[in-house]
Amino acid sequence: MTPRAAAASLAAMSTSSSSPGAAGRWLVFGLLAAAQFMVILDASVITIALASIQDDLGFAADDLQWVVSAYVIPFGGLLLLGGRVADVVGRKRTFLAGLGVFTLASLAGGLAQSELWLVVARAAQGIGAAFLAPAALSLVMTMFGDGEERTKALGLWGAVSGAAGAAGVLAGGTLTEGLGWEATLLVNVPIGAALAVAVRRTVRESRRADAREGFDVAGALTVVAGVTLAIYAIVNANDAGWGSAQTLALGGLAVAVLVAFFVIEARVAAPLVDLRLLRSRTVGGASLVALVVAAALHPMFYFGGLLMQQGLGFSALGSGVAWLPMSLLVMTSAGALAPRLIGRFGSARVLAGGGLLMAAGLVVWSRAAGADGYVEGILPALLVTAPGVGLAVVGGTVTATAGVPEHQAGIVSGLVNMTNQVGAAIGLAVLVAISSSRTADALAAGSAPADALGDGFSAAFLTGAGLA
């Protein structure tokens, strides 16, 4: 960036008379990273508690995934709007508002007494996270200039995000075993309150002073509606039939709504997302790859947790502890290894290499579904998959955000987070449908229930490997 461009960029900021020093920046980074950890962890922490939730609230097997999907669908669908609001209204202000909604929704979810109550609370959590997450990442992007320091920061950010997914299952097992599934949600309440106080006191406001655009509400509504219809069609396809009128009608309507989203974005004065970003090889290309990687990765925690508890008879705590090697390896590969490899080979190559390692790991997972124990099957799968997760998360984030101007920090942050969450939601819906279908076929053929369940899990893991 030239001195003139840098001056213009600074002129586009309203508050914050000066940037904090190095120590101050890393202190703020730590607070924002803690919030990101909580948000990403919440998508996986509850997976270990699913069996307990099913027993307590009476979820049907095919409906249980909505405990996860109800969170990631509004999270993914509203992230673009959250990024735009952060740029225009203020990144700190948006962060605190999202954190407040997320914390209150966590309280409501922990007190849930019915299936509907819990699903609605999870959806409210997703809405809060959709404004919190892009505001946090855009604050990081505006604090650290493009170059080695930003790569280091994003490497650590990726380590936090990747480790949160793996650590969530450990925390979920510990909390569920000791305090009940409700604790996986209630734990967010004191953490969220403490973060709100700390961020309010230490983080400076940051927004575009020249932003006079409105908010593309129509674009936000259509992208959420389109994704929700698509996932709902996939989830119910096993019962209604993949070629049924219901499935085809819902699928066609989802496509039409998503097409309407792109038409709206091409015509409105202040679109939710600049379509030129989607056509770029960095932002658009990396986001597309990240979407597919997320579709392969996130269902692994869902099926892995169920495999440990229902297939191998692990307790919730035992299942959580079993994920610990992956947590440690993801943190190491994302925080230490990925930045070095990016400096030497470039972020795109690191992203591709991470995807290949993930694919190999998911193949090992497919064999673990038929193994007799943890050491023989699951541990090798964790050891192969974990480095790929760390490299893919950091490589994708650095690729997508490289060279992004400050005035687009919020919307690009929203896009990066959106592709991750939408990919996770779609991937989970597709892989649950494939697993359920394979299990039903195996039972119809006379297989024992445990063997049929293993066949279904294997099919899901192999499909995830193909995506990766």
Image (tube, rainbow, N blue to C red):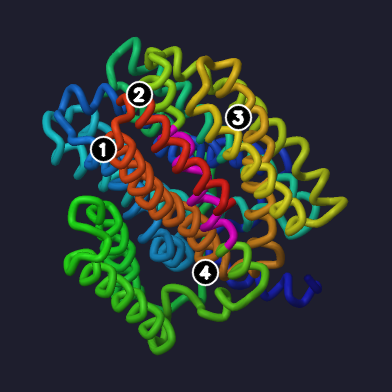
Sooner in the amino-acid sequence: mark 4 or mark 3: 4
Query: 128 or 172, which is in the foreground?
Result: 172
In terms of image quadrants, where is residue 243? bottom left
Image point 47% across, 37% down: which residue? 458
Image point 26% across, 44% down: which residue? 66
246 vs 117: above or below: below
Tell us which disc is closer to us: 2 or 3: 2
Q: Secondary structure at mark 3?
A: helix
Give the distance between the C-alpha atoms of the residues marked 3 and 1, in whole angstroms: 29 Å
Give the distance between the C-alpha atoms of the residues marked 2 and 3, in whole angstroms: 20 Å
Q: Secondary structure at mark 4?
A: loop
Tell us which disc is closer to us: 1 or 4: 1
Give the distance between the C-alpha atoms of the residues marked 4 and 3, in whole angstroms: 46 Å
Residue at the extreme top: 178
Name which residue type carries label 3: Ala
Q: Are marks 4 and 2 in contact (CB under 8 Å)?
A: no
Residue identifier under label 3: 381
Residue identifier under label 2: 450
440 vs 320: above or below: below
Residue identifier under label 4: 208
Image point 61% across, 58% down: which residue? 17
Residue identifier under label 1: 444
Tell us which disc is closer to us: 4 or 3: 3
Dot label at residue 101 = none
Query: 13 or 344, which is in the foreground?
Result: 344
Relative to 277, 175 lies left or right: left
Name which residue type carries label 1: Ala
Give the distance between the C-alpha atoms of the residues marked 2 and 1, in whole angstroms: 13 Å
